Amino acid sequence: MPYESKRLQNGGLYVRVDMPGVPSDNFTVSVTNGRVKVTGEAPALSHDSAGRSYSGDVAILSTPVDLPVRKIKTIAKNGVIRLVIPPL
């Protein structure tokens, strides 16, 4: 799963994840053991009857403390998921 990330001036983290074909309402974000996981599924199309599934995670924390998902700002549009993770 292609992604890019950068540290923000406030100490937070910006992550951009490419998930071609995944609708903005068909992805999930979870946090477990200091890792943010983004999962998405694209619907099957006439030329691709199996559809597409994406899953990947990014290590963001150096401790096992989990960040509440509700604190992660998510923006999804045209198969691109943007996450803004606040500083710890």
Image (spheres, grey):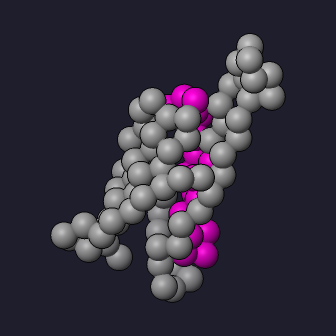
Kindly identify the residue that appears in the image at 35 percent across and 76 percent down.
88
Q: Which residues are magenta?
A: 21-39
In which quarter of the view is residue 43 placed? top right
In reply to whether residue 84 is colored magenta, the answer given is no
Q: Name the residue at the left extreme.
A: 9
Q: Position of residue 18 (x, y in %)?
A: 50, 44
Q: At which x and y percent is residue 64? A: 56, 82
Residue 46 or residue 28, whichever sits in front:
46
Q: Is 58 situated above or below 20?
A: below
User: Is residue 37 on the magenta stretch?
Assistant: yes
Residue 35 rendering spot, x and y as whole percentages: 56, 70
Tell me the residue at 45%/30% (across/down): 78
With respect to residue 33, does 40 lie above or below? above
- In the image, is residue 60 above or below residue 80? below
Residue 7 picture quarter: bottom left
- Locate residue 65 relative to residue 46 in the image: left or right: left
Report whether 40 appears left or right of 6.
right
Q: Which residue extends farthest right? A: 50
The residue at 48%/55% (across/down) is 3
